[in-house]
Image: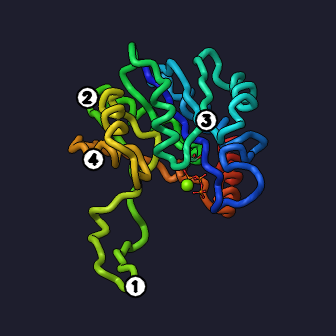
């Protein structure tokens, strides 16, 4: 399986706060972005043939130099991201080689600690013929839909709900069609495939693939890394 890995890392991390964009924030002495790259590289079944990393505009040169040693012998392209996550992924997709790629993984830099097994499961599902694959975990909270006025509309049956993670895996042609159709309001890439009527397959995700979003998540990340390094 020849896989191109797209890492959207161009967000500002407003919920996390701080001076530095989130993907460049460090845990255990290394940036979330480096941890995310390492997680993908560990999945040998993915057979990575290129990394495309979308970073905040203006930081491309610096990040290319900084990330190159971590890419090993996998070619690395660093590009400026866009206003929304979907814009960053679309810009990255435009520079992914068209020939010789059987799978595209899209992986948030913010999900820096995804276990290798999750990446392998996603790749395996694409290899088995799925056009779009997402790792999922059960939802633990009761989820309610609410109106604009803040009143509860209804409570979906929790057993039918899952929380979705990354990396998400795609047939390259399907992902290109999905992004060509427009990404407005899309918080993940599978959603764009759903809009085309493509079946999205789920595989088991992991609690460790949580998205570093708020300050407390950095504490959890430090603890997780310390545990792994024991
Ligand atoms: N992302 C991106 N381009 C954007 C927005 C987000 O590449 N214009 C990336 C982020 O860098 C992150 C991933 O998409 O790796 C998931 O987004 P999120 O967790 O929302 O990160 P931020 O947008 O940086 O955080 P916030 O929403 O709190 O500002
Ligand atoms: Mg965001």
Does 201 sit above or below residue 161?
A: above
Camera-side mark, 2 or 3: 3
Q: Earlier in the sequence, mark 1 or mark 4?
A: 1
- The dot on residue 194 is 4
- The dot on residue 129 is 2
Q: At x 31% / y 68%, what residue is drawn?
A: 158
Neighbour tally class for label 1: few under 14, some 14-19, many 20 plus, Cα within 10 Å: few
Label 2 sits on a secondary structure element that is loop
The alpha-carbon separation of the residues under discs 2 and 1 comes to 44 Å
Quadrant of res 144:
bottom left
Q: At x 21% / y 44%, what residue is drawn?
A: 197
Q: Earlier in the sequence, mark 2 or mark 3?
A: 3
Tag 3 residue: 80
The alpha-carbon separation of the residues under discs 1 and 4 comes to 29 Å
Neighbour tally class for label 4: few under 14, some 14-19, many 20 plus, Cα within 10 Å: few
Residue 147 point in image, percent of width and height = 35, 80
Q: Nearer the viewer, residue 222 or 227?
A: 222
Quadrant of res 156:
bottom left
Do tag 2 and tag 1 residues touch (Cβ < 8 Å)? no
């Amino acid at each position: 399986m020849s896989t191109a890995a797209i890492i959207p890392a161009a967000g500002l991390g407003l919920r996390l706060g701080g001076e530095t964009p989130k993907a460049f924030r460090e845990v255990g002495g290394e940036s979330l972005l480096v941890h995310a790259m390492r997680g993908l590289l560990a999945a040998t079944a993915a057979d990575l043939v290129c990394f495309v990393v979308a970073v905040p505009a203006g930081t491309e040169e610096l990040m290319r130099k900084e990330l190159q040693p971590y890419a090993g012998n996998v070619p690395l392209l660093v590009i400026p991201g866009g206003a929304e996550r979907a814009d960053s992924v679309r810009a990255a997709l435009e520079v992914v080689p068209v020939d010789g790629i059987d799978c595209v993984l899209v992986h948030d830099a913010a999900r820096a600690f995804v276990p290798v097994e999750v990446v392998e499961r996603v790749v395996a599902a694409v290899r088995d013929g799925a056009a779009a694959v997402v790792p999922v975990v059960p939802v633990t909270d009761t989820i309610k839909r609410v109106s604009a006025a803040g009143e509860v509309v209804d409570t979906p049956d929790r057993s039918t709900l899952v929380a979705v993670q990354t990396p998400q895996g795609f047939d390259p042609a399907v992902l290109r069609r999905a992004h060509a159709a427009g990404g407005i309001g899309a918080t993940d890439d599978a959603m764009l495939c759903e809009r085309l009527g493509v079946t999205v397959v789920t595989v088991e995700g992991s609690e460790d693939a949580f998205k570093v979003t708020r300050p407390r998540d950095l504490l959890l990340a430090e603890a997780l890394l310390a545990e792994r390094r024991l």
